[in-house]
Amino acid sequence: MSQRKIVDLSMYLENDVISDPPPWNPKIVYMRHDQTPEQITSFFPGLQKSDLPDGEGWAIEFVQLLTHHGTHLDAPYHFHSTMDRGERAITIDEVPLDWCLQPGVKLDFRHFPDGYVASASDVENELLRIGHELSPLEIVVVNTRAGSRYGESDYVTAGCGMGYEATMYLLERGVRLTGTDAWSWDAPFVHTAKRYEASGDASIIWEGHKAGRHIGYCHLEKLHNLEALPADGFTISCFPVKVRGASAGWTRAVAIFE
């Protein structure tokens, strides 16, 4: 009898851990059981705190988030107003659910330095190394150096990025959902800014994201624990929270092994 194993690929939503540039940090206010009895008694006239078991209310949290906080799935609408060379870009509530539960493939790019922009040949060489031929709708995740820096001050500037050519290499082979353990699918902005200053070429800015103008796709950002995965032989589940008309949705991404 087979036994299912599930590996968590998601980071926490939490205060005080750097997973975004400082102005964009999430804010979570935790309320304990001893702080909330009045929230219950207000529903029931005459009810006193002392009437509740141990005088306790409920635990509850107030959360201020961007849809791009924590492990999340970006919709094509995040990248551009159009996709598929002129069609309206779909929002996160319109993403086909069958994109979000598919066999997974991991590309190990941890050896590339921070800010490196992976090319189509880098993707092709890695697929040759692991002996995998891509199939349509497979979910391709990229293990970068950023995965080892989660919780550290340099997380948002760590890891390589996926360039336009690397992204299109995947999309042209039928991939519609990708992922990275870095802050962004593209190279960290601090490195791209230096390249832009030297070249003046605006096409290098967010080039992996902007590939979605030509072929619509989604990607996961801020994955975690990709080091625990083999190159293939697992399924990824990453259904997004259904935020109407939004550019992204949070997800509890997992890898499933049968």
Image: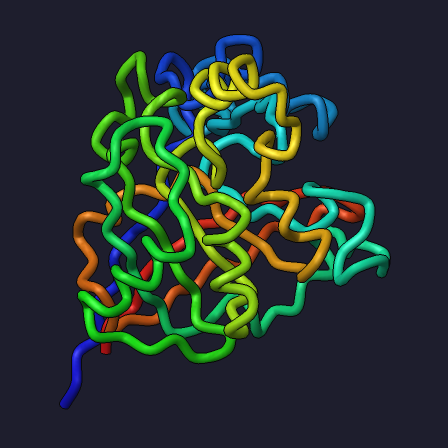
Reply above or below: 5 against 253: below
On screen, residue 251 versus residue 255, left or right, reads right
The answer to whether 81 appears left or right of 92 in the picture is right
Q: Residue 155 or 121: which is nearer the viewer?
A: 121
At a point 74% along the width and 24% down the height, the residue shown is 45
Image point (46%, 53%), residue name? 166
Q: Nearer the viewer, residue 33 or 133?
A: 133
Give the side of residue 10 with respect to residue 217, left or right. left
> Is the N terminus in the top left, top right, bottom left or bottom right quadrant?
bottom left
In the foreground, 223 or 173:
173
Query: Which residue corresponds to the image point at 26% horizontal and 46% vertical from the top-left?
Result: 109
Q: How many marks?
A: 0
Quarter assignment of residue 43: top right
Left or right: 91 as drawn, with respect to 65? right
Residue extending furthest toward the left: 1
Position in image of residue 57 (x %, y %): 50, 25
- Does residue 9 appear in this view? yes
Q: Quadrant of residue 160?
A: top left
Residue farthest toward the top in the current orientation of the protein? 23
Q: Position of residue 2 (x, y in %)?
A: 17, 85
Q: Residue at x 60, y 26 (%)?
A: 65
Residue 159 rendering spot, x and y as whole percentages = 32, 32
- Residue 22 x %, y %: 49, 9
